[in-house]
Amino acid sequence: MAQQRNTTIRDRHRKTIARGRPPCALCGESIDYELPYMDPGEFVVDHIVPRNRGGSDTLDNKQPAHRRCNRAKSDRADGGPVLRRSGSLSRPR
């Protein structure tokens, strides 16, 4: 059985990541942190190594992403097919 997530910690991590308003870690583009829930461009937290692949629910395994980029990555630990919109094949870091 999967470990239950703690919503207090989840919310704290979300605020910590959003504090600096960083760009999407998957595509490198800026994120509009004011977009409404379920908008494809909204800010979501992505697990770098997905939880179902053994990734932890700790801050060091989380990064900012657009909803659409996170959905495209899905549960792939390699980052999936998401490419930077600039045409570069490298991931931002």
Image (spheres, rainbow, N blue to C red):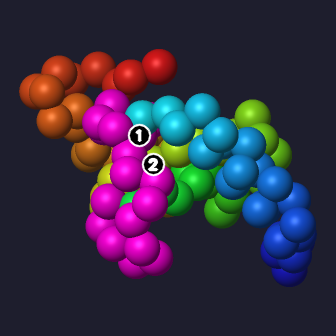
In screen coordinates, is 23 left or right of 89? right
Any part of residue 10 in sight: yes
Which quadrant of the figure has residue 3?
bottom right
- Residue shown at the point (78%, 61%) measured from the top left: 10
In the rendered structure, are the residues bearing label 2 and label 1 in contact, judged by CB atoms less than 8 Å apart? yes
Q: Residue under circle 2? A: 65
Between residues 89 and 44, which one lies in front from this camera angle? Answer: 44
Is the residue 12 above or below the residue 63 in the image? below
In screen coordinates, is 24 left or right of 11? left
Is the residue 32 above or below the residue 20 in the image? below
Asked if the magenta segment contains residue 34, the reply would be yes
Between residues 54 and 89, which one lies in front from this camera angle? Answer: 89
Determine the secondary structure under disc 2.
strand
Q: Which mark is residue 24?
A: 1
Which quadrant of the figure has residue 91?
top left
Give how far across and how far down residue 47 sits, in percent: 61, 50
Asked if the magenta segment contains residue 79, the reply would be no
Determine the secondary structure under disc 1.
loop
Is the residue 45 above or below the residue 27 in the image? below
In the picture, the quarter occupied by the N terminus is: bottom right
What residue range appears in magenta?
Answer: 24-41
Which quadrant of the figure has residue 51?
bottom right
Mark 2 Cα-neighbour bin, 10 Å: few <14, some 14–19, many ≥20? many
